Amino acid sequence: MASTRWLFGVTIFLGSFLLFLVEPIAAKQLLPMLGGSAAVWITCLVFFQTALLLAYLYAHWLARKPRWFVHFALLVVAACAALAWALRSYGIGTGAEQPVLTVFLALSGWIGLPFLALGATSPLLQAWWTRTEAGGIPYRLFALSNLASLLALALYPSAVEPWLTLRAQRITWACGFAVFAILSALLALKARDAQEASVEPAEIEGETSASSLGSKLLWVLLPMGAAMQLSAVTSYLTANIAPIPLLWILPLGVYLLTIILAFQFPALLARGLVTRVLLVMLGSLAYMMSKTDVALPMRISVTFFMIEVFVACFFCHSEAVALRPKRASETTLFYLLFAAGGALGSFLVGVASPLTFRFNYDLPATFLVTALLALAVTWKSGWNLRLLWGVASILMVLLVWWLHLAYQHETIAAVRNFYGTLRVRQNRSYPGSVTRTLLNGTIQHGTQYFGTEQLRHLPTSYYAEDSGVGLALRFCCAGKPRAIGVIGLGAGTIAAYGRPGDRIRFYEINPAVPPIANNVFTYLRDSGAHIDVVEGDGRLSLLREEPQRFDVLVVDAFSGDAIPLHLLTTEAVALYRRHLAPGGILAFHVSNQHVDLEPPIALLAKASGMKAMRVSNGPQDEIGEFGSTWILVTDSPDFFAQTEVATRVRPAAIKAGLRLWTDDYSSLLPVLHW
């Protein structure tokens, strides 16, 4: 029987490993359709949680009424679907207009059936275990499955993405799925044979009592709270604390770790200790969030949030495990409701909240839900805990209200959608004028001064006259009318360079940005140039257009945590060159604290037969100029030879060992600032 147990363990481990390995692979293939938005991963998470719920529903149905031919058929069809997806050539599609629908339709078509088969593995094989093996319900196998998931999560950015092309990743994964399908079919045969020789589950369970309705409700609500913690903390960290690519791995890794510990070592931490630490962490972070004008160092903030996620998710998961059923027939129901809670929590944060609120209240609302869950599960522990968590819940309500007031302070416009939370702040920080700043989380996308006529037309922030883009626009065309393309609208600051006869064409993926640029800022209205704004992903829009013959094409989309790598590939540069006039200039804005994009752009320029030069400038507060870094790329023999330009540029450095980025291969790991 030991060999059978090993077969169960290996199959569950492989299934969960493949399940979490396919998630970043599919999400990465999806990114070009949606412009590399930070919200793509959160929406993918909603899909994965929802698909997992359907997989658990299938496992619950199959465990109650075994129809072995159905599972055999699913494995065969899913293996064929995995192979078809693996061999499909990489392509750029459309879908920025309906991003959430695009995510669900694309992922369903690519990996829907394989994901269903993989997702059902852990609960289904635990039900089969009770038929083929002596002993109790093997809840520890769920810890094993999450250990495999955690391993896949760690290996993808560190060992898979840097070495394999996207097509090679899909093919390797499909081969692994074929092995998984064979192992699952073998176990299905063993479980079928065991069922024919066994008694009914009801006869085995004897007098074991069924789980109460309250317990079943908490099977949903507690995982919901943990999933809300995961989604809300991930969103808050990447938008407000540290816009670092791949930062989402940390909270997801902590989330998986708490599931492993809750199922494998349910008594690891005393309940009293967990609840007290949870109360301290919620209170500390709530106080920190209420001080909207104070920012802690990034490492301290990230550490505090990781501790809070660990404690909150461990509390929710361990309390759910403590209420797990003792009847084998309820095992798959437990996992079904557990998955339903995860899907509900990610849906509330990833989909419902952006559609409902114009400000981001996800984190304080999640803290409130966590406090209410703690109040519910500790209610029977006496009035001390009831009073403690009751007061904590009231304080979390006050936090939501306080943040609502804080967000409204100095805010003259705010909107939230799939692409983020945009806010325009107005204050008098600049002497003698009103300042308006466009913000997405903590990232500034443009500033304008409203005082004198000269101030209002002044290009500020990253686009000042001595910046890289300022040099390109001032010295590109020797006084003749210019054609300028800009990927990324922001406040429309580059329009300040427009002169009569010029043509400036902006490309903007977020439909909420153009109304703000047109109505709250005046760069577009005041420009002397002819202005066009094209909504949709810049690369996809350029792909559909006739050559625009731009003298300067500005690519400005790399300041956040989600770097749209599809704008930095050989195929993208070839597309840009098709739209450039002879001797035209590509201006890449690469100001980013956490990623060094200079080497990959320099490598792209070299591969395209062009010259790449770096322009850096420091901040000048007196004219509203930020420190910025630009990479200017051109095949013109004259542009960099101009005296005013030559004194400001230096050759862009190429990093040894860096591979050329293509639509089929890219990795941020080698260019992250550690």
Image: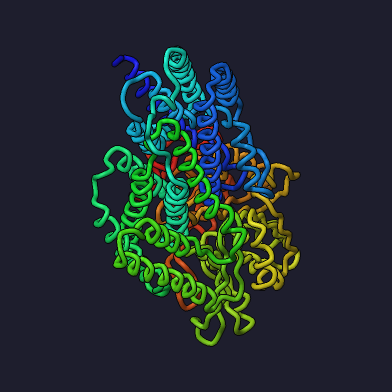
Please tell me which residue is depicted at 70% across the width and 54% down the height of the picture.
Answer: 535
Residue 123 visible? The answer is yes
Indicate left or right for 209 with 349 as reference: left
Residue 129 x/y as whole percent: 38, 23
Instruction: Where is residue 236? Give x, y as percent.
Output: 45, 59
Q: Is residue 321 above or below residue 293?
A: above
Question: How many badges with numbers are in the image?
Answer: 0
Q: Position of residue 250 (x, y in %)?
A: 37, 48
| Furthest residue in direction front, as rendered | 207
Position of 412 relative to 131 (above/below): below
Q: From this viewpoint, is residue 552 visible?
A: no
Q: Viewer-proximal residue, 303 or 327? A: 327
Q: Quadrant of the N terminus?
A: top left
Residue found at the very far bottom of the displayed protein: 432
**Front in this rendered view, residue 596 or 562:** 562
> Considering depth in this image, is 175 or 227 the residue closer to the camera?
227
Q: Where is residue 218 shown, x and y percent of the image?
A: 44, 50
The residue closer to the viewer here, 202 or 620, is: 202
Q: Is residue 572 left or right of residue 171?
A: right
